Amino acid sequence: MPSLSQPPAKRGRIRPGAVLLFLAGICGFLTVPFFLERAASSPAPEASVAGPAAVRPIQVRTPDGQTIGWLQISYPESIRQNEEQQLDVKYIGDKGKWGRVKDIAAMSVLIQAANLGLFPEPFEYRFNLARILRTGEDSHVWTVSPKQEGDYRLLVKFNVEPDSFTVLPVAVNGIDVSTNGETSLPVRVNTRYDVPQAWVDGLKAFGYVLSFILTLPLLKTFVERSWNRGRSGVAGPGV
């Protein structure tokens, strides 16, 4: 009798459509971080490009009630993570009244900026009264470089001695930001993508899940092909 043999099992074929889906998945997996990096390297938001805000929340008055100067604070209202911007604290004397500063024993400012990455130390500066007598102003600069996204407060404490000189809070845009020589200013720290960190994490997760879904057809074809190879190897020719 002629020997009977079982017809060979059909081998799974990789379909062109599955290959395209696989390539699309790989492209999606690789391009999500790329576009996020491009967003990070784009120009900073308008609030950051416009430069630091400058406010004069405190007046200095003599014992007889004359205003002889102001404390001016230039600070970043909005900043990115790891971005560096300046915090400039300046005393500006009222023109024609610089000489009244000679009656001041000391004038200093102390900065408290938790989680805002302030440097260098120390965070207290004593104004140069001799320079103010000559030029009418004196200033000191720190650098702000926050590491975490969030809403924070910049606390500035201003002190003038003797106590006969008055430190008077002044409203900024109709809002009292100073009390007893202490000024509290809001600072918004954005991610380097200028969107909340939760959005960034969600976009990354979506891209990775989408990439995985797009590779499923090719994975299915690969499994079927391996299964058919295994079956054809186990089943021998019939007799």
Image (tube, rainbow, N blue to C red):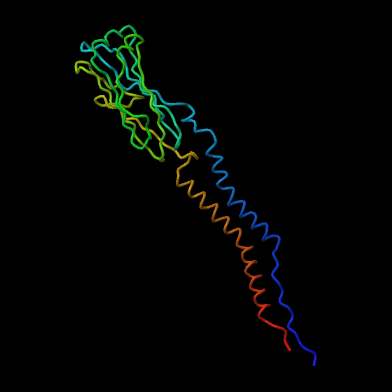
Marks counted in the figure total 0
Residue 149: image location, x then y, percent: 41, 40
Residue 230: image location, x then y, percent: 65, 75
Front position in the image: 53 or 10: 10
Would you say 219 lies left or right of 206 here?
right
Front position in the image: 16 or 132: 132
User: Which residue is found at the position 80% from the left and 93% from the top?
Assistant: 1
Would you say 154 lies left or right of 84 here?
left
User: Which residue is found at the position 53% from the left and 33% from the top?
Assistant: 43
Residue 29: image location, x then y, percent: 58, 52
Residue 62: image location, x then y, percent: 23, 12
The residue lying furthest to the front in this view is 121
Q: Quadrant of residue 182?
A: top left
Q: In which quarter of the image is residue 128?
A: top left
Front position in the image: 127 or 75: 127
Give the quadrant of the C terminus.
bottom right
The residue lying furthest to the right in this view is 2
Q: Judge whether 89 appears above or below 9 on screen.
A: above
Q: Judge whether 88 appears above or below 237 on screen.
A: above
Q: Judge whether 16 appears above or below 186 on screen.
A: below
User: Which residue is found at the position 52% from the left and 50% from the top?
Assistant: 204
The residue lying furthest to the bottom in this view is 1
